[in-house]
Image (cartoon, rainbow, N blue to C red):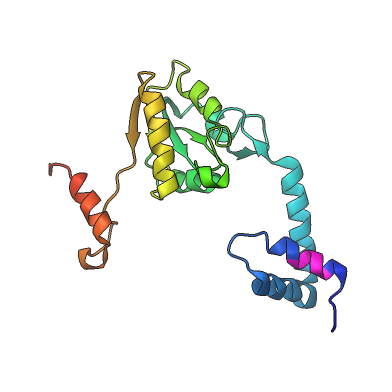
Amino acid sequence: MLRPPAALDALVAALKRLPGVGPRSAQRYAYHLLQHDRDGAEALASALIDATSKIRHCGRCNTFTEHEVCETCASPRRDPSKLCVVETPADQMTVEQTLAFDGLYFVLMGRLSPLDGVGPNEIHFDRLLARATDGVVREVILATNFTQEGEATAHYIGEMLRARGLKVSRLARGVPVGGELEYVDAATVAQALRDRRNVD
């Protein structure tokens, strides 16, 4: 049986570490890069090495940055009394793209998942607690995802922060803009009914 070169096996194994990439996809990507786009492969390798050597966590909000403190935390135009808690830097970027939030962030880099060994220490809860109780923050907005783990994370953080006298809010859930009721799942419609607001 023909065995691929060890370096090719190593490349496929590395690509399989990406989320959603299985053995067949990883093998297809590896062959494509080596057969059709060696310049792209070298650019990818160089960018990965550069990113892993330069990118670190912001000392204040825990997001990715090349500096001690990220641009958002360093900006004088942000409202330091509002702190939005998100699971990942990608979630932070999504909130930023709405242009609807002018406060600061804390990025958990995950969510509570006891079955996977992810507890409060792994989501940097002690750093979040210190940040939220610094005397400047007045409201903490929990913007974790609406998954079972995200909900558990929001509940845990909310309970701990409310016990310390902080105002805690949660992103509203409901029917998406442009959504039609007949195509929205029943749980989302039920939550939208519970979170209904007065019409001005």
Left/right placement of residue 62 relative to residue 3 reads: left
Q: What residue is shown at x 62% (from left), y 66% (from top)?
A: 21
Q: Report the front residue among 81 and 126.
A: 126
Q: How far from the left and from the top, in percent, is residue 26?
A: 69, 70
Q: What residue is shown at x 38% (from left), y 36% (from top)?
A: 155
Residue 37 appears in the rendering:
yes
Magenta stretch: give its range. 8-12
**Farthest residue, direction top:** 135
Q: How far from the left and from the top, in percent, is residue 61?
A: 55, 32
**Farthest residue, direction front:** 115
* Quadrant placement of the C terminus: top left
Q: How far from the left and from the top, in percent, is residue 84?
A: 43, 35
* Quadrant placement of the N terminus: bottom right
Question: With respect to residue 60, does 13 lie above or below?
Answer: below
Residue 143 appears in the rendering:
no
Left/right placement of residue 14 relative to residue 191 reads: right
